[in-house]
Each structure stands twice: as structure tokens, then as C-alpha cells.
Amino acid sequence: MKKIAVVGTGYVGLVTGTCFAETGNQVVCVDIDEQKVEKMRNGFVPIYEPHLDVLFERNIKANRLSFTTSLEEGIEDAEIIFLALPTPPGEDGSADLSYILGVADELGKLIKEYKVIVDKSTVPVGTAEKVHAAVQANAKVDFDIVSNPEFLREGFAVDDFLKPDRVVIGTSSERAEKVMEQLYKPFVRQGNPIIFMDEKSAELTKYAANSFLATKITFMNEIANFCEKVGADVDKVRIGIGSDTRIGKRFLFPGIGYGGSCFPKDVQALVKSGREENFEFEILNAVMAINEQQKTVLLPKIKNFFRGNLKGKRIGMWGLAFKPDTDDIREAPALYMIEALLKEGAQIKAYDPEAMENVKSQIGDVISYEANEYDALKEVDALIICTEWGIFRNPDFGKMKENMKDAVIFDGRNLFDIEEMTSKGFYYNSIGRKTIEK
Ligand code: UDX
């Protein structure tokens, strides 16, 4: 059992704190937002993440998970202090470290005995050094800094945390290395590695992993776009190349671009870090440009179908979140589609199982928010699928056709079989595959 403080109860902090409590540690989460802390004390989970609520409640009840607004109180007994603070992109795309360095500065004044201070946030190479200097400026006792990036996927965060493929620990201190090894041992019992390295390599590992995955997706998006030109089927190509273990089957699904809180931000931040060292990431520049275009790759197809005029066309939209099983709409391709369609004069009837409130608070009533997936189809000229929620995968096609004015689907996530859709009487246009004309 370890005593742990987690500073910052955003997505990463909450999952980290709750999962450490679930494995028997004593965890105090610290956040400056009083209202949020009060709500969490009453068992309210401020984010949507499958399975988190159950763990949250169980650990609060067992007195292993508690909350405070006081940094001093939160870290007093903790041997390990996790920093899970936001690193939003500044205007120039570089990560803003002011939250992290602000807390580091405070910690220097507050710590009264040896602590391991862990960067959990995604931070540019060299941040551990800066955090060390900020704590050191006021510290009267020993401490160590560790870089321990997270690789959680939204929607699978609890599972990813409890059963990680690997744990990356960046530190130059043997003492901190031992503490972190003890902490993470229960999570890698199946034999997955805890990989120890220096702080800078750990920091770069996170950016390199996300940038690589974003590149993999973008590569497939380009292949998909080319498939359409030459009449090949990207699904076949995907399976064909993915069976090579050097390539692997995962993250090869083409679509309407990657979004979310990590890939766009991290790719941009790595490019920016490169420029600070007079280093240009040519591949990542291309990845960013292609992804930007990909978010609205359906638009020319839709315009073409409606002979260039979308004025007054009613469009149903399935999915608003940047991916399924989350209410997160950060950099969601659906938002780019909405903007583009509204500009063309179309009307949008949208449905998303979780993300509608977030969209409404961001863009208001410029689109209509429907009660379910079939209401979003009433009298529409076409349906656009932006997110591959499970519920959209096996719909009642008869009911869909009854509701739609015209059985026309533009699928940005390749949910259905082309021949099957055509035989059911749909015009079905997807990504990187043939469209059989009616
Ligand atoms: C990602 C990383 O996977 C995770 O390790 C890191 O810690 C945070 O960033 P997340 O943003 O939650 O996680 O989502 P992920 O499931 O990785 O998907 C990211 C985006 O890529 C989504 O927009 C998704 O639709 C898109 N994607 C993913 C594809 O377009 N094709 C794929 O094959 C996979």
C-alpha cells in the first residue's frame, strides 16, 4: 500500500487516482475547483468513462479515495505526488506548462519529507528538468522527479490503466525507480514490462507513440482516398497489410480523420518542440495537413450527389463525439462537418448517445438535437455517419428507410457492407470503397 496524492482531477487524474485506490492504495485527489470537489465527495464522477463510476463509488466508500481543495493537506502524507494537470496548446501550438510549474513551485514550499513527484501530464521533452528546478527553488528536503506518461484511450481508460501494455518510468534516481516499481507491480502481473529510462526519453516516448499512431491512421486515410480513385477496396487493403505482424491490424481504420484531446494536440506540440531545436518534422507536417482535409472529405461527395446545391437539404447526422464511448467532442470531425454543411445552407438533425449536451453548449441550436437515431432521420435527404457508436452498427434498416425522405447514406466510419446496403435499396457512399450507383 502506498500513500498517493493526485493533483488535478481531469480525465487522467481521475482515472489514475481511482485505479490506484482500486489496487489498495490510499489516494487523495486535489483540485482547486471547490464545486467539483464537493460533487466528487458525494460520489459524482465529473466525466463519462465506462466502469469508472463503479470503481469511484467503491473506493470512496472504502475510504481509499478522498478529495480536497488544499494542496498542503492533499500531499501531507503522500509518498508519491502525481501531477495530472492540463497542458493546453498555447497560441503557437506549444504546450502551456504554467499549471504544472505553478504547482511545482508550491510543492517546493510545502514538502517536509522525501517525495517522489511524478509528471503524468503529456509534457514536452525537458519538462522534468523544469519541474525539478521549480521545486528545488524552495525545497528544504530531498525529492525526485519522475516522468510517467499515460497511454489511456478514452472509453477504455480503466482497462488500459489496470492492464497496461507497458508502463514507462523516466527517472535518473534509483530510489524513485524502486518506489515506482513497487507501485506498478500489481498492474503488470501478466508479464507486460515496466520500462525504465531517463526522463527525456520517457517524455518523448509519449509524443512519439501518439504521433506514430496518428501517422498510421493518416497513412490509411490517404490509401483510402487513393482506393476511391482507382476502384480498390480499402477494407481489403487494410486486412491485406494488417496481417503482416510488422504492420499489425490495429489503428488501420480509415475514416473522417482523427480527433480527440490527444492526437491533434500532441502531434502539433511535437512539431513545435522540433522547431525550437531547428528541427522540422516533415512527416508530421504532412499528417496534420492531410488530417485537416480528411475531416471534411465527405463534403465534396455530398455536394456532388446533390449537384452542388445543399441549400435547404435536411441532413441526419449519427455521432458527434470524436469517437464512440465518450462524450468528448474536442477536435471531433463531426463539428467540422457541421460547420461546412451549415455554410452550404443545409439543415442538420443530429443524434449522439452521450455528446449532445457538450455540442449544444458549444454551438447552441444551429442544429437540432434528436431523441434517438431514428428521429434524426425523419424526412432527411441523407444521413451522414460521423462516429461508430455500437448502436449504429446494427440498426433497423426498414425503419431507417421509412423515416428518411431518401435512402442515402454517407458513412465516414465504414460501418456497413456495401453489397448488403445496395441490395437493401440504399445509396451507400463510404470511405475508400466503391459506391454502387442506384
Ligand atoms: C489516444 C491514444 O490511443 C492513447 O494511447 C493516448 O493516451 C491518448 O490518445 P484517444 O484520443 O482516447 O487515445 O482515442 P483513440 O482510440 O486512440 O482514437 C483517436 C482518434 O483516432 C479518434 O478520432 C479515432 O476515431 C481515430 N482512429 C483511431 C481512426 O480514425 N482510425 C483508427 O484505426 C483508430
Image (spheres, rainbow, N blue to C red):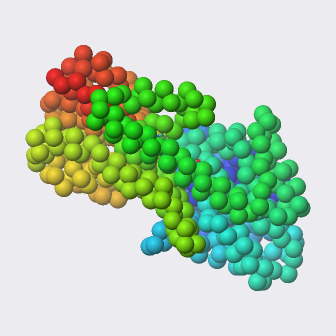
Tell me: residue 436, above or below residue 268: above
Q: Nearer the viewer, residue 37 or 370?
A: 370
Residue 81 placed where, x, y %? Answer: 75, 63
Residue 88 visible to the viewer? no
Residue 373 placed where, x, y %? Answer: 31, 34
Tell me what residue is drawn at x 20 percent, y 35 percent. 382
Tell me what residue is drawn at x 19 percent, y 55 percent. 343
Tell me what residue is drawn at x 78 percent, y 34 percent. 190
Tell me: residue 38, above or below residue 346: below
Residue 84 placed where, x, y %? Answer: 64, 61
Tell me: residue 402, above or below residue 120: above
Residue 396 visible to the viewer? yes
Relative side of 181 to 349, left or right:
right
Tell me what residue is drawn at x 50 percent, y 49 percent. 214
Residue 141 placed where, x, y %? Answer: 87, 77
Give the quadrant of the C terminus.
Answer: top left
